[in-house]
Amino acid sequence: MPINRKLRIGLSDLRYLYLLVFFTLFYQAFSQASVANFETKGAVCSSAEVQFQNASFEFYADTPTYIWRFVGAETEEVTQFAKQTATAKWSTSGTKSVRLVMLMQNGDSVFIEKEIVVNKTPSPAFTWDNACNLTPIKFNPEEESTSNKLCFVWNFNDEQSDNKRNPSYLFSEIGVKTVTLHILDSTTGCTDSLQKSIQVLQQPDVSFTIYPNTSICAGDTIRVTNTSTNKDLQYVWDFGDGSPFDTAFSTEHSYIKSERTEIHSITLSTEIAGGCKNQYSKSLTVNVLPDASFTWTIYGNAYQLKGPTGNSIYNWTFDDGGTATSQDVTYRPKDYPYFNVTACLATKNAECWNESCQSMSPMMGVEGVAIQSFAIYPNPSAGVFTIELKNIGNYTLCVIDLLGNNVPFSENGNTVDLSSLKNGVYFIQIEQNDRVYNKKVMIAR
């Protein structure tokens, strides 16, 4: 049965309608399937451009607009009309929020928001000490982190490189020099560099010599000779013993006696106007003098002398020509029975000598102090003497002739009777503990 023409036309229109509905639904479904996404590219560091790779999925029939929002960045919003790589920079480290919005042509939109960690970029700033041409310059980075993951690369005017954190470098020529520090965090990949220009100034050469040597004895005088190159500069000497500074070009200095060996630092300093200071130091050992003190007593017809301990050499000399080399000496004067003599003791320890002298006499006591402890009167006498004692205490008494022999006597209280002896000179000796006191008496009838 033939189909009505009008009916055929109606069916055809219906097919077109179905197709239109199908493609509309298909478009809407795939447009909703567009996905926004991104990834970071490379190191993510503060104060550096961070790259973001746009990884969004686009429906083939649409060309969306991309809107980036970087919270807290220097530029917080970026609009792109094509799928491109975006960049952002944050001045501080920490967790940051990034949003990417896909805006479709039909007004629909999809977005994604992520949090990223921005790592701290190490600071390449640095300082240095005085820049002088005779002294290595010490460089100090200002980066506070002491992590062993930090790598330092220094370049000194293309003359030399160094990987130390705090290097030193000597620029031997004056003038402007370029120093570059490149610093890398090997964990995060964050890196930065800084180049600075420094002015290297002229520094004076300073040196001196010490005469006779760098080890002397207390009380000695040294001479310091300035051997510096610049003769027309003002120099200052510091001898390290608290004495006033000396501004002579070369000079002499004496070190006072001390109870112990001391080491002093002698320093010579100067400065070039508009340039650098410089100084040069040497150590000087000032050795303590050995002990040369001694004590003496009279026993019989000789002197007993006791020297100090701890010395390597003892040289005794007496003004009557006698000598001895032991620490303690028993000495009988050569002009005996005349007892008056001067004794000198020279001692050596290490490289230093010292000397002391004392006059000895029977009328003197221990250590050469005049005896005031007792008196005898009348003197001279016919043989009977009265002894007046002062704070001596228990003692023993004897009488000695000029030959050093003990002679007989009688004692009654504070009276000593020598009447049995011949006319002449005798010594009344009182001994108490380790002290001996002598008085010369004369019997004259």
Image: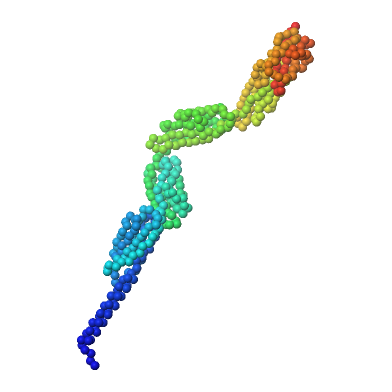
Q: Residue at x 71, y 21 (%)?
A: 432
Q: Residue furthest top?
A: 445
Quadrant that contains the C terminus: top right
Q: 16 left or right of 204? A: left
Quadrant that contains the N terminus: bottom left
Q: Is residue 60 visible?
A: no
Quadrant in which residue 200 is drawn: top left
x and y, in percent, of residue 328 in the image: 69, 26
Q: Is residue 286 visible?
A: yes
Q: Residue at x 40, y 40 (%)?
A: 201
In the foreground, 346 or 165: 165
x and y, in percent, of residue 416 in the image: 75, 13
Q: Is residue 230 above or below residue 315?
A: below
Q: Is residue 63 above or below residue 380?
A: below
Q: Residue at x 34, y 61 (%)?
A: 99
Q: Is residue 306 above or below residue 169?
A: above
Q: 319 left or right of 57? A: right
Quadrant in which residue 83 is drawn: bottom left
Q: Residue furthest bottom?
A: 1
Quadrant in which residue 329 is drawn: top right
Q: Residue at x 38, y 63 (%)?
A: 39
